[in-house]
Image (cartoon, helix red, strand yellow):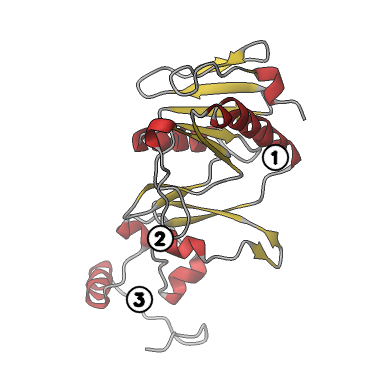
Amino acid sequence: MRAKTLSEPITKVSPTRRSRNKRKNNVYSDAERGHGTVGPKAALCGFFPRLLTAADLAVLPSDLPSGPVVYELDNGRLIVMPPPGDIHGAIESNIGTELKIQGERRGLGKARSGGVGVILRKDPDRVVGPDAVFVCQSSLPIQTSKEGYLETIPDLVVEVRSKNDTGPEIARKVQDYLKAGVRAVWVSDPGKRTVTIHRPGQKAKVLHENDVVTIPDIIPGFELPVRDVFRV
């Protein structure tokens, strides 16, 4: 059936008939499917985006004509993010370096940084790119998907808060990590110059510049002054 043009008369359809037509044509709004919302153009065309998988994510371009991009999957829905800025990158590097030196080189596990992909769950897929992770020796060897993403859930995840990250977004992501089995999540906030430590079933602990980050149950002996986290 061809689409009606704006010059053609519009026939009013009752709500009951519209509902029958939807069932007949098996076309439902994204909200009715529980998939959030779509733009007006997609709705007019009768197009509804399907959920993506880790395999789909792996073949998406990292560079667009407008510049580089970073992706994640939120229960199959594509999230497009700009690449991190200079300060974000410096903080990520500071923490990743300490995890490598104080953890991996002492034989306590493996450190990864640079937005490594981690599959938290599948069907629908939740694929995230934390700024740094640490996997304890007891969880090695690291298991990866055929796309190269970590299937082994890290013991520690580090997120550096970007200027566009909202409080609810960060809180939801932290809960996703903890539900997947992550034992500790550090959220570094460049604006407040704090590191917040989240653990399952515990109240979040906020560390300030005069404090020292430790994690004895995951990396015994690890010490990182908060002020050093934010040295750029």
In the picture, residue 100 is in which quadrant? top right
Q: Quadrant of the N terminus?
A: bottom left
Dot 1 or dot 3, earlier in sequence: 3
* Label 1 sits on residue: 89
Q: CA distance from mark 1 to mark 3?
A: 56 Å
Q: CA distance from mark 1 to mark 2?
A: 27 Å
Q: Tag 1, which secondary structure?
A: helix
In the picture, residue 53 is in which quadrant? bottom left
Q: Residues within 10 Å of mark 1 (few under 14, many from 20)?
A: some
Q: Residues within 10 Å of mark 2 (few under 14, many from 20)?
A: many
Taking depth in this image into account, of 218 and 213 the one nearest to the observer is 218
Taking depth in this image into account, of 138 and 203 the one nearest to the observer is 138
* Label 3 sits on residue: 12
Q: Position of residue 66 (x, y in %)?
A: 71, 63
Q: Position of residue 212 (x, y in %)?
A: 61, 14
Q: Tag 2, which secondary structure?
A: loop
* Label 2 sits on residue: 53
Residue 27 seen by the camera: yes
Q: Is residue 111 above or below residue 50?
A: above
In the picture, residue 152 is in which quadrant? top left
Dot 3 or dot 2, earlier in sequence: 3
The amino acid on which the numbered mark 1 sits, given as a three-letter code, is Gly
The amino acid on which the numbered mark 2 sits, given as a three-letter code, is Thr
Dot 1 or dot 2, earlier in sequence: 2
The label on residue 102 is none
Q: CA distance from mark 3 to mark 2?
A: 39 Å
